[in-house]
Image (cartoon, rainbow, N blue to C red):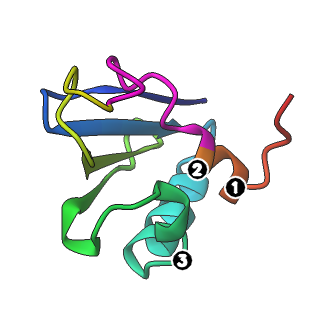
Amino acid sequence: MVRSKNAGPFTLTIDVMFDDPADAVRLHADLTSGTLEPALGPVAGEDVRVYLDETAAAVKLSVGRALPAGSAGDLDLYGCQQHVGVLAALGVPLP
């Protein structure tokens, strides 16, 4: 399961949850090596923080928003559509 949401007006959080903790460990390694960074859109590398929780078999990304939530030009106030790039990078077929 992959989902995204606001973590305040300047940060998005993207959660990627697996059935197997080993999958979370592999994704964490890819993300920390910069492999999937292009999937996150126009954010600088230092604006992406990656957290691994093996117990929950999950990876959490905190990503700086290009524009503050709700400001002029912001197209996703709640940040609920920002996970699509990660889905595509993971090879998940999109509808």
Q: Which residue is at a point 82% across and 36% down the rendered structure image?
A: 94
Few, some or many C-alpha atoms within 10 Å of disc 3 (few <14, some 14-19, many ≥20)? few
The amino acid type, in three-letter code, at marker 1 is Leu
Magenta stretch, main secondary structure class: loop
Mark before the other along the chain sequence, 1 or 3? 3
Q: Residue furthest bottom?
A: 33
Tell me if residue 55 is in the magenta stretch: no
Vertical arrangement, residue 22 with respect to residue 19, above or below: below
Range drawn in magenta: 74-84
In the rendered structure, the answer to whether residue 11 lies left or right of residue 42 reads left
What residue is disc 1 on? 90
Q: Are marks 2 and 1 in contact (CB under 8 Å)?
A: yes
Where residue 76 appears, as percent x and y from the top left, is 40, 24
Q: Are marks 1 and 3 in contact (CB under 8 Å)?
A: no
Front-most of residues 27 and 25: 27
Q: Are marks 2 and 3 in contact (CB under 8 Å)?
A: no
Where residue 87 appears, as percent x and y from the top left, is 66, 45
Estimate the spatial distance between the alpha carbons at disc 1 and disc 3, rounded to whole Å: 11 Å
Q: Which residue is at a point 27% across and 70% down the rendered structure image?
A: 44
Few, some or many C-alpha atoms within 10 Å of disc 1 (few <14, some 14-19, many ≥20)? few
The amino acid type, in three-letter code, at marker 2 is Val
Q: Which residue is at a point 17% across and 34% down the rendered structure image?
A: 68
* Quadrant in the picture for the N terminus: top right
The amino acid type, in three-letter code, at marker 3 is Thr
Few, some or many C-alpha atoms within 10 Å of disc 2 (few <14, some 14-19, many ≥20)? many
What residue is disc 3 on? 35
Estimate the spatial distance between the alpha carbons at disc 2 and disc 3, rounded to whole Å: 11 Å
Q: Which residue is at a point 60% across and 55% down the rendered structure image?
A: 23
What residue is disc 2 on? 86
Where residue 64 appears, as percent x and y from the top left, is 22, 50
